Image (cartoon, rainbow, N blue to C red):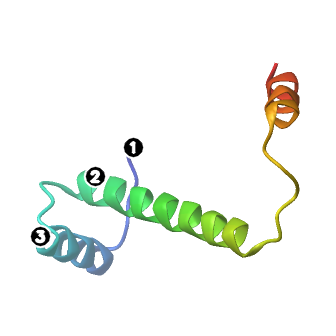
Amino acid sequence: MNHSMPETSLACVDEQALQRGCGSNSEYERELIRDQARQHLRGLLLEGAASAPAGPADQSYFEGLRRRAA
């Protein structure tokens, strides 16, 4: 991925990459994206854990999931 940014921003990214032990700016950006994905997943899991049960997870429940996925 190629993109441009002001020198001041680039210096900030370089510093953050160095502090996190990343070998390059691209590696730092990938790490940021993974962190964001983990935070999103964590939010979804917490939301699910806080919600009321929808019903039993029995054989018919999983058959319904398989039908929807097919």
Q: Are marks 3 and 1 in contact (CB under 8 Å)?
A: no
Q: Position of residue 41 (x, y in %)?
A: 57, 60
Tell me the CA gap for discs 1 and 2.
8 Å
Identity of the residue drawn at 82% across and 18% down: 70
Under mark 3, the amino acid is: Leu
Disc assigned to residue 63: none
Identity of the residue drawn at 17% across and 55% down: 24
* Vertical relation: 43 (above or below) 29: below
As drawn, is 47 to the left or to the right of 37? right
Q: Secondary structure at mark 1?
A: loop
Q: Secondary structure at mark 2?
A: helix
Q: Which residue is mark 3?
A: 18
Assign the N terminus to one quadrant of the image. top left
* Vertical relation: 22 (above or below) 2: below
Q: Are marks 1 and 2 in contact (CB under 8 Å)?
A: yes
Q: Which residue is mark 2?
A: 26
**Residue 63: quadrant of the picture:** top right
Disc assigned to residue 1: 1
Q: Position of residue 10 (x, y in %)?
A: 27, 71
